[in-house]
């Protein structure tokens, strides 16, 4: 039955394969199909750029010619090839042809249909349809198939199992042929064009990426690849957060504090599965959750809207999301510097961010931020790193910002801003991140014994010494060493015969102990000398003064209080008013330090 004498199809309905389907079902049998040369030119242009929709559209025209040769339709090409100036007006040219031939415009492009209606052009809009039949490629998938790998002249393979427990399996002994793969590629593109569950996420010269229901399908061909290849990936595990058996402490952090999270792990480790579980967990808590993905392949509830790059730019997507005001946003597959910068901008704007990052170690995920964002704001951007491997959460790190002397350095003058990276469950500091000269250092921390990162280290040293009847005046723990100041009479007892006592204490604490006698605190102590550098005035004392808090006095008049550093010095900025008073007092012999 012919419902229209003349039909003008536009590019959209040619590419999605709907027109040949209508001929075969009899709905357009006997129709006069007028194919615009402008549509042919557009498809040829796409095919020359190795874009799959161009090849799919040209294949549809080849089938239409076959149907015409069989007498099922009459096929005619009409109009002129568009000039370069007309390339951006293809839809307009097709509408004008439909009007000039008094034909019905056939389209699956909603905007094209609306414009044609407004211009009083006869038009039939083919709404997206949900195909019930399986794709040809689905025959290669089983319940535990994670991905299927098909290539011209190669036997089909599949990766089966679960993250961390996979096997590469040959599916057939017969190599695939080029025409088989081309038919599959065409079917995939056509289905993506007309299915409400399908999207063409990326379409470039030699490569097309399609999201079709639960499948993410990459189609590549020359010149990008050395042959036609189709790779289809399907998530085989959709789990709740409870599946990971996380301690209550982790749930408390996720609920109350963690608002900048990196989910890290190697490819295929289960990062996206964990991100899906976390997204659903937040949704169940009543939070507004969105995703930023390219391609959109996270399997989440309909309540969670999935966004792709707006006009090819994820930064524009972030602008829209800031207006939408989600509580949490999942940023999937962060790789380029711009991805990390967008993540940082959104986090600093107050949005809870969860980023998915490829990394072989948990610390590598943090290192990917270095150089891309300011070092000092990293703990504000990311406070929690969750490392997933073999579908299990293996490590959780938290980051804090402080000012201290980095491990391995001993002088107070070397104190600087330091980012500590700690094991969230155990509390041990694993790494320190700080600047040293022009370089950013990521330094592993040795936790084989007590260290200055342990807030109870000094108290622990005091407790051990008291078991030997030694009551230290002061204890300073720096790195793997502790400086202990005791009364002179306690020194022999602490050292022991042949150094045995101090050796036992060092073994028990896991620290090297430096024993220093104190001098009775009393009146003024004269400095050994005062000297100047380009920026400072330095007061130098005898070694026994190290660690003491003193009052600097000139002519009996107090100037300030300070702690003598480990090198028995006090450093004063030359620009301060007291600097000149120190120099003047020293030159007149009236500069002293009082310890009471």
Image (spheres, rainbow, N blue to C red):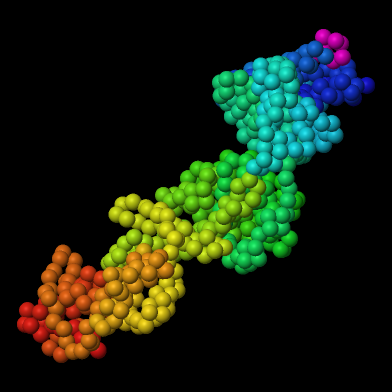
Q: What residue do we see at 57% from left, 55% from top?
A: 395
The residue positioned farthest toward the top in the image shown: 69
400 or 494: nearer the viewer: 494
Asked if the magenta segment contains residue 73, the reply would be: yes
The image quadrant that residue 309 belongs to is top right
Label count reads 0
Whole-percent x, y for residue 484 in the image: 31, 75
Q: Nearer the viewer, residue 334 or 86?
A: 334
- Residue 526 appears in view: yes
Image quadrant holding the C terminus, namely bottom left
Q: Which residues are magenta?
A: 68-75
User: Which residue is pictured at 66% across the width and 22% down the height?
Assistant: 151
Q: Is residue 581 left or right of residue 138?
A: left
Please say whether residue 120 is visible from this viewpoint: no
* Residue ID at (22%, 69%): 567
Q: Position of residue 589 (x, y in %)?
A: 7, 83
- Residue at image location 56% in from the left, 49% down from the top: 264
Identify which residue, 148 or 455, lies in the foreground: 455
Residue 332 against residue 502 in the figure, above or below: above
**Image spot of residue 490 (x, y percent):** 29, 81
The vertical placement of 299 against 520, above or below, is above
**Measured along the vertical axis of the image, is residue 388 above or below residue 159?**
below
The one nearer the camera, 178 or 395, is 395
Q: Residue furthest left?
A: 588
Query: In the image, is 496 to the left or to the right of 344?
Result: left
Residue lying farthest right? 1
Tell me if residue 331 is in the magenta stretch: no
């Amino acid at each position: 039955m012919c419902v229209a004498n003349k039909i003008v199809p536009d590019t959209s309905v040619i590419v999605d394969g709907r027109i040949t389907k209508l001929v075969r079902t009899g709905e357009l049998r006997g129709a006069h199909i007028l194919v615009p040369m402008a549509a042919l030119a557009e498809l040829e242009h796409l095919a020359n750029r190795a874009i799959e929709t161009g090849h799919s559209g040209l294949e549809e025209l080849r089938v239409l010619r076959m149907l015409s040769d069989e007498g099922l339709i009459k096929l005619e090409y009409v109009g002129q090839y568009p000039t370069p100036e007309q390339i951006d007006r293809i839809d307009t040219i097709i509408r004008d042809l439909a009007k000039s031939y008094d034909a019905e415009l056939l389209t699956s492009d909603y905007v094209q249909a609306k414009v044609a209606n407004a211009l009083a052009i006869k038009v039939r809009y083919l709404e997206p349809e949900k195909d019930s039949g399986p794709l040809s490629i689905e025959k290669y998938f089983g319940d535990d198939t994670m991905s299927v790998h098909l290539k011209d002249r190669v036997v089909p393979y599949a990766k089966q199992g679960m993250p961390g427990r996979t096997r590469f399996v040959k599916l057939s002994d017969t190599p695939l042929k080029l025409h088989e793969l081309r038919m599959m590629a065409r079917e995939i593109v056509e289905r993506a064009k007309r299915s409400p569950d399908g999207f063409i996420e990326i379409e470039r010269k030699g490569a097309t990426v399609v999201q079709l229901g639960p499948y993410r399908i990459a189609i590549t061909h020359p010149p990008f690849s050395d042959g036609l290849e189709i790779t289809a990936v399907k998530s085989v595990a959709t789990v709740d957060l409870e599946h990971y058996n996380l301690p209550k402490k982790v749930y408390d952090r996720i609920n109350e504090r963690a608002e900048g999270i990196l989910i890290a792990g190697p490819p295929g480790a289960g990062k996206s599965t964990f991100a899906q579980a976390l997204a659903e967990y937040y949704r169940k808590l009543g939070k507004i959750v969105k995703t930023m993905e390219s391609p959109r392949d996270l399997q989440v509830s309909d309540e969670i809207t999935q966004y792709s790059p707006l006009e090819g730019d994820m930064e524009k997507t972030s602008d829209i999301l800031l207006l939408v005001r989600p509580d949490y946003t999942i940023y999937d597959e962060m790789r380029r510097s711009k991805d990390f910068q967008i993540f940082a901008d959104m986090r600093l704007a107050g949005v809870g961010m969860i980023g998915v990052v490829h990394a072989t170690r948990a610390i590598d995920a943090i290192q990917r931020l270095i150089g891309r964002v300011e070092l000092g704001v990293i703990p504000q951007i990311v406070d929690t790193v969750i490392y997933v491997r073999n579908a299990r959460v293996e490590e959780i790190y938290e980051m804090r910002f402080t000012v201290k002397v980095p491990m391995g350095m001993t002088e107070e003058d070397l104190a600087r801003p330091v980012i500590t990276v700690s094991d969230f469950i155990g509390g041990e500091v694993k790494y320190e991140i700080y600047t040293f000269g022009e370089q950013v250092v990521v330094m592993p921390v040795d936790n084989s014994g007590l260290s200055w990162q342990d807030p109870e280290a000094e108290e622990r040293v005091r407790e051990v010494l008291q078991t030997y009847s030694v009551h230290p005046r002061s204890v300073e723990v720096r790195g793997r060493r502790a400086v202990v100041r005791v009364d002179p009479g306690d020194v022999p007892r602490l050292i022991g015969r042949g150094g045995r006592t101090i050796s036992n204490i060092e073994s028990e604490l896991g620290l090297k102990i430096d024993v220093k006698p104190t001098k009775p605190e009393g009146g003024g102590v004269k400095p050994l000398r005062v000297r100047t550098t380009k920026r400072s005035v330095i007061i130098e004392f005898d070694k026994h003064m190290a660690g003491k808090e003193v009052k600097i006095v000139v002519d009996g008049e107090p100037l300030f209080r300070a702690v003598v550093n480990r090198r028995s010095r006090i450093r004063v900025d030359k620009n301060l008013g007291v600097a000149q008073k120190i120099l003047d007092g020293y030159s007149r012999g009236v500069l002293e330090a009082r310890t009471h």
